[in-house]
């Protein structure tokens, strides 16, 4: 029997009641792990420290956990976690509710100035959405754009269509719903009444009604017995009359089978363990589930260099972003100071008006009213005022779309000097960040050197692995990670069926660089008639090698390069499935415009005739290779499918680029026995690099 990896509707009903006991708990901190696991740290005088886990991928679960079992906090919290920390600072848990009889739990937090609701969707692909007091989505882990509902930042949150709730139904409605089915009793309970297979069988057993009995053969007495069984379960869930059980496969209790809020007749022959709370039972169940794969993944003692390298790269990216932010912040403060001097008379009039009023003991409220009246009269100085804060002694003015907070008791010069000093302070922080990034780059190089040394020492063993024939990598419990950085990794790229390299730009800067540095004699240059396409080069040879004079690039490679160029153009984003592509020789491409013309960055002039491939179809596949290297690859399906150990084809569709990347990641994880391997070499971010801009969907999904 497959073990449960997601909560049922019955589980959610039991949890909502049990977690309601923690209403009043204060939020302390939020943490997000791997884009699917949220940890909320709560506390309260009646129950001390409380750790709540909400995971929406695999598994899908919600429960409290002992502090010693919480995962270590990420070194740098992602934006989603920081947003939650800001929204929930000082907030108290106000309610925990299940939406109808669905696998959706809502956690409402309140504080004096606003309310925030976290919605955990524990069905389908899973999702977390954060709503404000108007039920507008502030942020979500995944965006949802379906015909039936939308979940995207800035829009009003839409629940799925409410499922039939059998826990609150009257007897007549229950019988009517059952009678509408043309299936047997157990399938009707499972699907039409939304109990699922296990509880459908459980209710039949409790009511002593045969599973496979047709609805039309069911008697009134049997309907009453089924309703009584449903009503009994509903009453226990509503009243919190639980008796949680953890069930095991065998008497040795080595393998967990299931966890339920109440004892089940269906499991009465299985060994079980009773718990004081359903939360405790869930925590033990999912902890046991997590331990089992670890016992199987003992095939390699190779250090996880890739994870450490990715970590250092993430830190560098964050530090680079911080430096950019510091530069922008410092420049913004200097601009404000310069605007004060450029509008000296106006700013001086505002400050002098407030200073004269305060010298006459005029209250701040009256000053604010006077300025508002001056604005109505069209006085420029009053019109520039946006806010007066008497508690801080400040006034905020708006000049050229810049809001500048001024200290009202000083003059223009001192306010400007304060802004210049703030810019200087920010630049000092930038210098510190630059030193930190240099240290991180050294650590990154050290990890790479350790990896090279380990691989050199272990090369003999790896060679033996390479010599094995017909290895079924999908079934291997442990796959050695073998990768190296290539010069073309930062561009779009793939190798054709004939093993020619094709590279394309991700933006105008890269298009410019490709043509100037990498377009050599013998190469072919591809582009589309559509605006916003990558400059695509089919390389005749490696940049460090000379191209043979008699080299002929096969037609299959030319066709694949054309499909690559059209697939990563704006046509994909527009939902189109084909377009025209042309190619020319390398010496036909120039950056020198005709007289009187101008070429923008990333644009080029083409001299001479072009060869067109009309109605070239779009097409992209993303795959994972296991030998000779372990990595993500992507491009035209004909070039990727045979080269990859496993691949998935996509076409233009409704899922945003980051969402479809996560779907592919989950699908790849399900295909490999060694799911840690996918996490190492094919993270959603790496997969996304090979996806076209715009929306996509998996073909045949």
Image: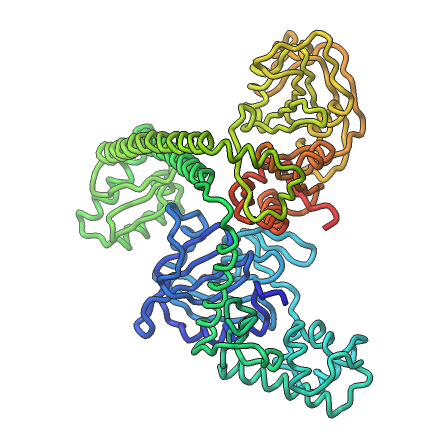
For the point 32% across and 75% down, which residue is it?
A: 46
Residue 80 horizontal side relative to residue 552, left or right: left
**Image point (33%, 47%), residue name:** 371
- Residue 340 at least partly seen: no
* Residue 240 percent coordinates (x, y): 49, 81
x and y percentages locating residue 89 in the rendered image: 36, 58
Residue drawn at point x = 64 percent, y = 47 percent: 655
Answer above or below: position of 551 versus 446: above
Left or right: residue 375 versus residue 265 is left
Nearest the viewer among 459 and 395 is 459
Q: Quadrant of residue 351?
A: top left
**Most distant residue in the bottom direction:** 221
451 relative position to 358: left or right? right
Identify whether 412 is placed above or below 58: above
Residue 170 shows up from this direction: yes
Number of numbered discs on residues: 0
The image shows residue 275 at horizontal and vertical percentages of 45, 77
Which residue appears at 40% of the width and 29% of the height? 449
Front-most of residues 531 and 191: 191
In the displayed structure, does residue 308 sit left or right of residue 419?
A: right
Here the colouring is rainbow
**The N terminus is located in which quarter?**
bottom right
Return the residue nearer the eye: 295 or 182: 295
Q: Position of residue 302 (x, y in %)?
A: 46, 41
Residue 116 found in image quarter: bottom left
């Amino acid at each position: 029997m497959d073990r449960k990896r997601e909560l049922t509707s019955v589980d959610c009903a039991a949890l909502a009641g049990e977690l309601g006991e923690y209403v009043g708990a204060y939020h302390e901190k939020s943490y997000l792990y791997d884009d699917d696991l949220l940890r909320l740290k709560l506390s309260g005088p009646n129950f001390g420290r409380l750790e709540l886990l909400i995971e929406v991928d695999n598994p899908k679960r919600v429960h409290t956990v002992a502090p010693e079992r919480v995962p270590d906090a990420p070194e740098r919290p992602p934006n989603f976690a920081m947003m939650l920390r800001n929204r929930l600072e000082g907030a108290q848990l106000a309610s925990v509710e299940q939406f109808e009889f669905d696998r959706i739990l809502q956690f409402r937090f309140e504080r004096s100035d606003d309310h925030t609701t976290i919605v955990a969707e524990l069905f389908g692909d899973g999702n977390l959405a954060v709503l404000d007091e108007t039920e507008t989505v502030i942020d979500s882990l995944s965006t949802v754009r379906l015909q039936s509902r939308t979940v995207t930042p800035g829009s009003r949150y839409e629940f799925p269509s409410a499922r039939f709730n059998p826990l609150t139904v009257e007897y007549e409605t229950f019988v009517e719903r059952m009678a509408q089915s043309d299936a047997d009793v157990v399938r009707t309970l499972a699907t039409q009444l939304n109990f699922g297979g296990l509880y459908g069988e459980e209710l039949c057993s409790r009511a002593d009604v045969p599973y496979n009995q047709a609805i039309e053969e069911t008697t009134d007495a049997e309907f009453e017995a089924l309703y009584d069984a449903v009503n009994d379960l509903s009453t226990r869930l509503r009243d919190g009359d639980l008796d949680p059980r953890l069930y095991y496969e065998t008497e040795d209790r080595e393998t967990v089978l299931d966890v339920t809020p109440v004892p089940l007749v269906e499991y009465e022959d299985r060994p079980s363990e009773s718990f004081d709370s359903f939360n405790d039972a869930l925590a033990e169940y999912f902890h046991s589930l997590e331990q089992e794969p670890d016992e199987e993944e003992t095939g390699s003692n190779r250090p996880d260099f890739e994870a450490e390298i990715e970590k250092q790269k993430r830190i560098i990216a964050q530090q680079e972003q911080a430096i950019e932010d510091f530069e922008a912040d410092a420049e913004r403060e200097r601009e404000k100071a310069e605007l004060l001097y450029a509008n000296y008379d106006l700013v001086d009039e505002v400050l002098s008006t407030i200073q004269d009023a305060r010298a006459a003991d005029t209250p701040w409220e009256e000053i604010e009213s006077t300025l508002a009246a001056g604005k109505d009269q069209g006085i420029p100085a009053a019109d520039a005022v946006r806010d007066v804060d008497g508690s801080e002694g400040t006034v905020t003015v708006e000049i050229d779309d810049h809001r500048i907070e001024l200290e009202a008791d000083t003059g223009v010069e001192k306010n400007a000097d304060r802004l210049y000093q703030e810019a200087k302070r920010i630049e000092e922080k930038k210098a510190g960040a630059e030193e930190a990034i240099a240290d991180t780059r050294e650590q990154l190089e050290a990890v790479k050197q350790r990896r090279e040394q380990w691989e050199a020492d272990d090369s003999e063993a790896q060679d033996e692995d390479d010599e094995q024939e017909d290895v079924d990598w999908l079934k291997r419990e442990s796959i050695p990670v073998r990768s190296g950085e290539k010069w073309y990794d930062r561009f779009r790229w793939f190798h054709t069926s004939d093993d020619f390299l094709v590279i394309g730009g991700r933006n105008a800067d890269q298009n410019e660089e490709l043509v100037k540095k990498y377009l050599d004699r013998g190469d072919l240059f591809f582009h589309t008639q559509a605006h916003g396409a990558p400059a695509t080069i089919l390389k005749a040879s490696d940049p460090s090698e000379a191209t043979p004079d008699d080299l002929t690039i096969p037609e299959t490679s030319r066709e694949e390069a054309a499909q690559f160029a059209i697939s990563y153009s704006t046509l994909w984003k527009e939902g189109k499935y084909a377009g025209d592509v042309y190619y020319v020789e390398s010496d036909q491409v120039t950056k020198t415009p005709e007289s009187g013309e101008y070429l923008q960055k990333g644009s080029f002039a083409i001299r001479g005739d072009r060869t067109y491939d009309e109605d070239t179809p779009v097409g992209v596949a993303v795959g994972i290779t296991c030998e000779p290297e372990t990595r993500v690859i992507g491009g035209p399906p004909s070039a990727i499918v045979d080269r990859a150990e496993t691949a998935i084809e996509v076409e233009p569709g409704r899922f945003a680029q980051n969402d479809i990347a996560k779907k592919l990641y989950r699908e790849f994880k399900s295909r490999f026995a060694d799911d840690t391997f996918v996490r190492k070499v094919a993270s959603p971010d790496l997969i996304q690099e090979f996806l076209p801009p715009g929306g996509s969907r998996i073909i045949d999904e």
